[in-house]
Image (cartoon, coloured by chain):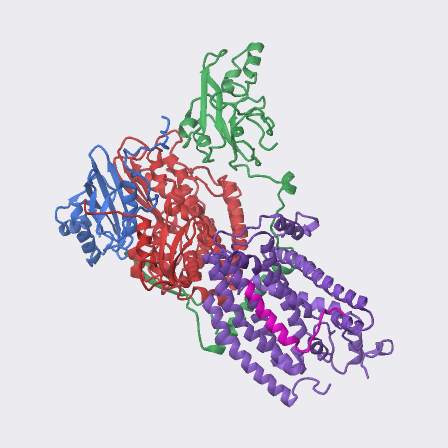
Chain colours: A green, B red, C blue, D purple
Amino acid sequence: MALFDPKGARAETRQVAGKSVAVLLAPRLVRRGFLHDVFYGLKSLLTGMRVTLPYGLTTSRIVTRQYPENRGTLKMYERYRARLTFIRDGQGRHTCTGCRNCEKACPNGSIIIETAKGAVTGKNEVQRFIWRFDACTFCNLCVYTCPFDALEMKGDFEHAVFDRRLLVYNLNSYAGPHASLWDKVEDEEQRKTLATKISPYDGKVPLAGTSMAGCPARAHGEGGAS
Amino acid sequence: MTVQAYTLDDLVKRLDPQATEGASQQYFLNLGPQHPAAHGVLRVMLFLDGETVVRAIPVLGYIHRGIEKMGESLSTRQFIHLTDRLDYLSALMNNWAVARTVEKAAGIEVSPRAEWIRTIMAELQRLQSHLLWLGVLGMDLGAFTPFLWGFRDREELTYIFEETIGARLTMNYVLPGGVMSDIHPEFAARVKKYVAYIRPKIAEYEALLSGNVILEERLRNIGRLSAEDAVSIGATGPVLRASGVALDLRKASPYGAYDKLEFQVPVGTVGDSWDRYWVRFEEMRQSIAMIEQLLGGIPEGPHMSVKPAVKVKLPEGVHYGQLETARGILGVFIAAAGGSDVPYRIHLRSPTFNNLWSVTRLAPGWRIADLVAILTTLDLVIPDIER
Amino acid sequence: MEANELQEVVLAFASGAKVREKTDRPSLTVPAASLPDLLAKLKADERLSFDMLLDHTAVDWLERGVLELFYQLFSTRHGHTLTVSAEVPREEPVAPSVSGVHLIAEWQEREVYDMFGVLYEGHPDLRRLLLDDSWVGHPLRKDYRDDHMIERPK
Amino acid sequence: MSVFSPAAVIAAPQVFEVKTLASRAATALPGSLLESALYVLLAVVWIVALLALTGLALIYLERKIAGHFQCRLGPMRVGPHGIFQTVADTIKLLVKEDFVPDGADKVLHVVAPFLALTATILLLVILPLSPILQAADMNIGVVYVTAISGFGVMGILLGGWSSNNKWSMIGAMRAGAQIISYEISATLALLVVVLFAGTLRLSGIVQSQADGWWIWRAHGVGVVAFVIYVIASTAEINRTPFDIPEGESELAAGFHTEYSGIRFAFFFLAEFINMFLVAGFAATFFWGGWMPFHVGGLDGFNSVMDLVPAGAWFAAKTSALVFLVMWFRWTFPRLRVDQMMRLEWKILLPVGFVNLFAAALVVLYGLYFFPGT
């Protein structure tokens, strides 16, 4: 009789919390004197060694992946929450209306939205959609609450920078209205104005997107890994 | 005022060997807050006689983040994402506990599909949590290999979570009314594959650890917690069950899809470290069995019954909900002033808080190495204790 | 035992107890002084056998000027639950300790002392639990302010 | 008379003549002082080279093997398959700040790692790697081995005690109890072989196995002695399942918690070389050391075996034993300190004594294989 019998668990029914519950009783260990214990003790050690030996001798069970080398083939899952971005159509237009639902949903104020009356459409539109990557907890509530499906979490990786101020993003590279309003603008010139890229953000968080010593400038809003 | 609060310094002075005559062999030793066996920033002040523990004084607060205070200014939906950061190994179950309490308070119906998703995710996470615990137990007892094996097997599970949820650890998946997103189309196939993968691995762990005479010696009869003490301490989860009380909320007051599942509750006989070890080990098997049963029938329907734009207002009053996480009963206490989705006060009863307290009862008389075994079989997650 | 029945049985136990409204569990409010006795009786009684103190916490009702202590009781034998609450004044929050009845109350009460400043009479080891001993104030009180607190923007 | 046909080609089994570097120096001395000095220098260089190279190789191997046991790759970055990882780590340790903690006993703290390494070097001197690669041999070799391996604990004890750290202190005290206890069992196991070989000289013990290694020639007694020796010496070198003095998860590194830089490297090196030594001595005593696999009487077979050089036999046997010790480490949990003592005093020691007694009977009645030769 070995020291431990894996199938030694006893099934029974017990009364707990006013209900009868099917339980499985833990097996206790068998001790039957010196020779028995030494023999089966040694045997249990050899059993363990038999389990590990194939691992030690072969390389086929290795699961490590070598990270920088496999960067090219590394695919993140499509739902992976890593970076908040605007969903854009083929022409690069977003559908954000600046309704601030995401700002209100954000538990720790990682999203700041600035809106203004659009010069062309005359409607309230998003000027800057500031997302503080450094504060974000990736709870996905902004994406979840967005009524216009304007946001998504992208699955890129390698976001490390040397200055956390560089982790403040402006998601909209142009300050413009909801995509559906674009079609109503007929004048070609006005459309161009709409699509003009806004200058690097210089509001409350000054350094976002600009360059500084040791930190190359990064395009805000797009591209994760550079 | 007659009641006088005092400080840790006072306590130390009281126990100081120099102050107590003839006890010069006794000394203080800090296990933690930076210690490999403390699993985070637990600090246990040990009053030792040689290697034997005379008194163990857990000192908390190294990772207290004031989540309850934060909860007083967050809507419950926002608060849920903070619960990920309690017991991060059962993040999803923490989410669920708050969501359930809010649902019960606000009278929200949850579709069978959402309940199904929650249940299977919770069981996957329980399995994941126990796998990590098993590995850590190996490492704490000196066997480094199971640690990485545990991580290897857990990694496959985190991929499953990542695919459906988009996060590996801090999931924020369960919201009042359902779950944040429907399962990934490949979810069921992946889980099936995983179940086929993990079964032989569990057998391997059993041969490597359960049967090992050294491990048995290290766990058998170490840190016996009697059933009465366990109940009085309010220990829950595997710690309580190892002491012989088969209290499992999944059976006692079934929630989610647990009432449709057939499973057994593993319980211990004497409440020593070995029983705690075995109960968790067996729970992994039961979880796998549950996952298999769940895969049999996926109900159709919506995954969420509350529109994102709707504020889930809490009616005035006191609400209490609880749920069985991988470590025991997580209780959510909400006092609402009414008319708002922000609770007036939210309190979390974390299972490891009570489980840790049992250390003060279990440790005296055992050696440092046993204390490590006791701590690891209590399966502590420090952020859960301190919130 | 049904919720109503349970409440009735318990009411018979406790003198000066009232049913606490607006809760989702059988609940009653009792005078703070009677807590240890009551919990001990609830634990000892065969029909009730509330042997586990699941949770103990407090709520700071700033407007009413009271701290309400909540005790969530659970019976591992019968599976029923009971919420016992007691009010202590904010200005002089003294309550008897129940750590003689339920072991875990020792820590739960330390946490409540730490966060709300409730002083427990007869507590064997009343120290702060989570915060440092040098901390000033009790942070979960509604009127607590310190230099590092940030107001959540509305 | 041989059963194998190549007997015609291959001469009778080689007679191994042991020439240690020390004896060469001694024989050269009356004639040429220079030659003698050269041999002494050669011995010193040999020991240092052996120390450094085996150290590097073993640390690399341990990491790789540990990696594979744990489904990892092990070191992969420094050099192809990380072969220069140990070199890089050595450089790191050399340039690292070498501090003595506040309140530590400065002298002892500095001296302790040297003591640990000295014991190791003294043992390397006597390890017979091949008939010609042995720095020194002595007629009381076994006594020397036992004495010096007990000396290594001094370094650990002093290191732990002088660190002014309670964890180190606990680790050192554990180490003291452990190493001294297991010394007894290891010695009892070696005595079995001494009984059979009839000599305390290490080269003599190797040569006594020309008809077969003691592990199988001595019937069951040899196997039991071998198992006891492996267990006891694993404990002596503080390796899992007996890494109680270090107890990573309990004592956070035990006696060398407060060591860094080069002095930590010395402890580390001593630990790994000790593993090599233990494997080497186990091979020498039980597996015939550098002696090829011989079966008494089968001269043809024996001469085929002799084609493989003696040093290669030693290397192969030692590597196998080193792998065994590493295999232990990556499989077993750690024992508790009192369980470890119980294992020694209640199991290994009685079994060892009974085994020694049985061995004495076997020798007395000449019951082992090929007693005549």
Vertical position of residue C102 compared to residue C86: above or below:
below
Left or right? Give the position of A207 relative to A56.
Answer: left
Magenta segment includes D141: yes
**Which residues, given as a range, are shown in magenta?**
D131-155
Residue D182, located in which quarter of the rendered image? bottom right
Q: Nearer the viewer, residue D302 or A195?
A: D302
- Which residue is most to the right? D9
Residue C138, x across and y down, in percent: 29, 39
Vertical position of residue A134 compared to residue B260: above or below:
above
Q: Main secondary structure of the magenta part?
A: helix
Q: Residue at x 16, y 45 (%)?
A: C31
**Whether residue A53 is visible:** no
Left or right? Give the position of C106 relative to D170.
Answer: left
Residue D212, x across and y down, in percent: 71, 79
Residue B95, x across and y down, in percent: 39, 42
Q: Residue at x 50, y 76 (%)?
A: D347
